[in-house]
Amino acid sequence: MTDVIEPIDLLALDRQVCFALSIASRSVIAMYRPLLQPLSLTHPQYLAMLALWEHERLSVKELGELLQLDPGTMSPLLKRLEAVGYVTRRRDSQDERVLMVTLTSAGRALRAEAEKIPLAIVERLGMGLDELQRLHESLTRVIEASRAANRA
């Protein structure tokens, strides 16, 4: 009896990297919702706050570049963060064309509550830190490769 080698269906949905990334992204972001809701943050707002906790003050352009979001997305996101009192937006005194985003005292204080989130996510994922670090490194390579391919 001979073994028959089945051809691989390159278009099978469950073999697509884009499908796996899409499902993983939506699933992980959904895990954040109940943790962010008491902080009055959406996931994109949380990412903006992470950048601001790291840098304290950024121009809208710098923040958009860090988050890889376009100005049309940044504006309503920042308006909502300002409305809940976590940030202020002011024109730069050195260059009136530049809109600066700065944490308020409430925004800085929120960091203490947010520090619980990463460990809660790790616990909910049930994956070790080493495995998650390797995943992060792989995803970073995917991002870099896709950016390079899109520039070409």
Image (cartoon, helix red, strand yellow):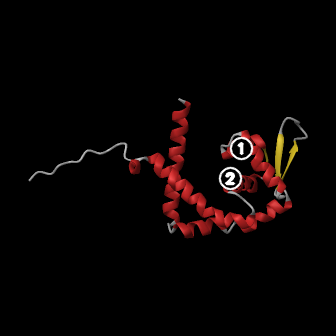
Near-viewer residue (75 or 103): 75
Q: Which mark is residue 136?
A: none
> Mark 1 falls on what kind of element?
helix
- Amino acid beneath label 2: Pro
Q: Secondary structure at mark 2?
A: helix
Q: Can residue 57 be seen in this snapshot?
A: no
Q: Is residue 151 above or below residue 41?
A: above
What number is the disc on residue 73?
1
Tell me residue 139's x, y (percent).
52, 50
Q: Is residue 92 left or right of residue 15?
A: right
In this image, 138 relative to 3: left or right? right
Q: Is residue 23 visible?
A: yes
Q: Are marks 2 and 1 in contact (CB under 8 Å)?
A: yes
Q: Residue 105: where, in percent of width, then height? A: 85, 61
Q: Residue 114's x, y, as percent? A: 71, 65
Q: Which residue reaches farthest left? A: 1
Q: Position of residue 69 (x, y in %)?
A: 68, 43
Q: Residue furthest top?
A: 152
Distance from the alpha carbon under mark 2 to that under mark 1:
10 Å
Which sits in the foreground, 73 or 122?
73
Identified at 40% across, 48% down, the residue is 13
Counting residues from the start of the chain, the first of labels 2 and 1 encountered is 2
Label 2: how many Cα within 10 Å (few below 14, some 14–19, many 20+): some
The three-letter code of the residue at mark 1 reads Thr
Q: Which label number is shown at residue 44?
A: 2
Foreground residue, 120 or 144?
A: 120
Q: Nearer the viewer, residue 141 or 121?
A: 121
142 sits to left or right of 36: left
Residue drawn at (80%, 61%), measured in percent from left and top? 108
